[in-house]
Image (spheres, rainbow, N blue to C red):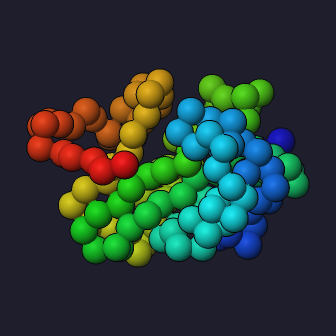
Amino acid sequence: MAMEIRFGAEHTDFETVHGWLTATYWSPGVTRETVERAASYSSIVVNAFVGERQIGYCRIVSDRTTFAWVCDVYVVEEERGKGYARAMVTAAMEDPEHQGLRRWLLATRDAHGVYQQIGFEPLVEPARWMVRH
């Protein structure tokens, strides 16, 4: 069965996605309310399905003019390695309202190869970037 992409929070199984994200290294213990609120304020929410089973999720935070941040990319373990994460991010990047942006950004601990295949590269000057926690 082929993977299908569905855009929009209305297609998201938030109970499932919350379970996924709370177990990740980037969102341990995140509340379901936070997951749903983050989706509602995101520029794009991408859901991947095989049949009626949700197998992937990601969202984009963007001003739709200059910048986009790819975040919360997740594919269930048994479906990894099939290109679904790349497909979700690519579909988001092809969205008509997100063309001509100067910069797409993401952070990953272990999936650099996935994103390099669709044009992401390490920051040229990482020392210029700052973060506040």
Q: Image quadrant of residue 102?
A: bottom left
Asked if 66 appears above or below 84 in the picture, the reply is below
- Residue 91 is situated, as x and y percent measured from the top left of the image, at 52, 56
| In-front residue for pair 126/99 | 126
Image quarter of residue 97:
bottom left
The residue at 36%/32% (across/down) is: 116
Q: Nearer the viewer, residue 91 or 30?
A: 30
Residue nearer the viewer, 61 or 78 = 61
Residue 121: x, y in percent?
Answer: 27, 35
Q: Is residue 16 above or below residue 11?
A: above
Residue at the (69%, 65%) spot, across then down: 33
**Residue beneath the point at 25% across and 56% down:** 103
Quadrant where the N terminus lies? top right
Tell me if I can see residue 120 in this picture.
yes
- Name the residue: 62% across, 39% down: 28
Residue 118: image location, x then y, percent = 39, 40
